[in-house]
Amino acid sequence: MKNINPDTFCPSLWYHMRILPSGKMRFCRWGGISKQDSRDSIKSDLTQENFPEYFQNEMSTLRMDMIQGTHIPECQDCRLMETHGKVSGRERQLLKVGIQRNNFDKTFRSSPFYNEFQKSADNNGHTDLWPQDWQIDLGNQCNSNCIFCTPEYSSKLGAELKKLGLVNYKKPATNWSNDDAAVDQFVDMLAKSKKLAYLHFVGGEPLVIPGFKKILEKLVDRGLNKTVSIGFTTNLTLWDKSIIDLLSQYQEVNLGMSLECFDKINNYLRYPSKIDHVQDTLEKFLLASKNKNWLNSLRITPTLFSVPHLVSIYEYAYSKNIGVESCNFLDEPAHMRMNVLPMDMRKPFADKIQQWIDSKNLPLTDNITINYRDPNLSQKGILEDAQSYVDYIRNAPEETHRLPDTVSYIKKLETLRGNTILDYVSPEYEKLLRSAGY
Amino acid sequence: MKNYYDLLDINVKVIVAPNDKAILPEAIVSINNCVLYDGILDRAQDLRLKVDLLIPISIKVELKNKKYDEESRDNGIKIQLLTIDDFELIPNFTYLAEYKNDHNYQKPTSMLPFNGVWSITTDDRPFYQWHHIIHKQGWLLEP
């Protein structure tokens, strides 16, 4: 293992797996929907027989690429995050096996997984391990039509786009977790896994996907609730006491709550939710969380429309000592990226966030806080996350050429929704959108 | 080109000093059972040892033969510094040390006024795994 590259090596391939809404498997939770799918599992069913084959053998090429320091195209989102000082998925995964970026050599050699890396290096990338850390995309069934989402993750948005002729498929993406046999097989496989540590569920919206509750119940039946940590991300539009009670039986719950800001534009972005209702649900979740000692984080997906209001989220989280997370700098849909805005518009937004950071008088160091889920580090983590957005907003290359796509897209959606972006944005935005054909 | 087969060293550094220069303490300092100092501590001693990266680390400082009379009241050992690589254990992690002494004094301290052994260990783990845990860096998955 002479070619390990500290700037690209990611240990995730030795302990992490993701199930896509279709039931196919992918090697990384940060490998977004726009990424190549050529390296997903070939078989789509979650049978016990084919599962180890993908993780242990089909992923061998990727592991060898990682060991040999070869550039892996699917890792581009993490590289972008690190460029702007945002804690990347790679850094989070390094930390879970005790490897620190700023002291790579010694911590890599000291990692409990070092011998497994070595074994794979000697066996063409093969591993005998099973995943311990899962992201489970339950399916695309969702009660929201977030404007920056995609049909693969929102059935309602998919239906709209189909009506508008913007997508062309005969049937929407499947929800593997609606198949009881697949759920049973999956839980059987989890029960056989050694050292299973974490299961993070996303949708769609987990609270409307029946498979979520089914899996939670089956894991309790197997006693895995006593040893496994659960995480899930919800859109704060629903409250299901039976699921809250079920989650209470788990030893650790990581609760991710999605919203963009506390401005009314959240209604437009996370259509058809209403910010007042979202806030009420947020407070309910926070109360439940406090009583049950869950770990909380606000999940944001900053876009060109929410960037003026980012401080509202950071301030709320800071005051309540809740983490703020975003999976990456939004990549797809490209016409929703923050850097679609021209530089002169972006600068005041960056300045506003910077002023907010400075107002906290909490020194930031070069040692980025990575374990931001530790409540003792939440505030520092929030400031560091905000700082990474300042860097991105100031420096990401301008992509104003996408503005006509942005305008075209929102105009079409507005014909179905009967709303207009102009009710939610400043005159400066209106001028910009008009210039692009709104 | 790196070769991770080669073990990397860790630098352990301890500075101990007498608390009262009028009455000098008798001290034994060891790292992983390697005795670096054994005798009357007449001045600050800068003691260092390189240990293999993957070996658990145990540091012991012992005060012995102290008399509990008025004259020897301030006799003791001060642990002025304890670092492993660039990581300072004192004062932030003093609470992780064990202090077995003849007065059953239990509070975290780096000043040893009683006959006994002050020790800190990496809990049978390589230092950097222990470092991860004491810094509350979250899960440390094991295969």
Image (cartoon, rainbow, N blue to C red):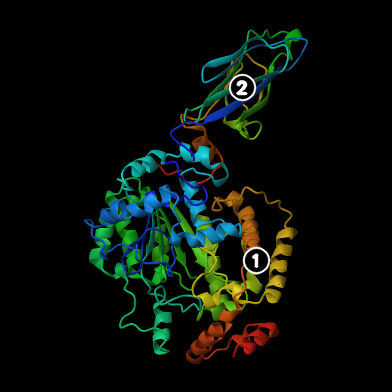
**With A386 as the anchor, is A123 left or right in this view?**
left
Quarter of image, res A114: top left
| Residue B54 percent across, percent down from the top left | 47, 31
**Circles 2 and 1 on the same subunit:** no
- Which numbered dot is residue B75? none
> Residue B131, can we see it?
yes
Above or below, B53 against A49 in this view is above
Q: Amino acid at mark 2?
A: Arg
| Badge 1: residue crowd in 10 Å (few <14, some 14–19, many ≥20) | some
Q: Determine the residue positioned at 29% across, 70% down.
A: A178
Above or below, A62 against B95 in this view is below
Residue sitting at the far front: B1
Q: Amino acid at mark 1?
A: Asn
Q: CA distance from mark 2 to mark 1?
A: 46 Å
Question: Relative to the observer, which residue lies in front, B55 or A210?
Answer: B55
Residue underneath mark 2: B48
| Residue B104 percent across, percent down from the top left | 59, 19
Question: Relative to the observer, which residue lies in front, A161 or A72?
Answer: A72
Q: Quadrant of the N terminus of chain A?
A: top left
| Residue A294 percent across, percent down from the top left | 49, 55
| Badge 2: residue crowd in 10 Å (few <14, some 14–19, many ≥20) | some
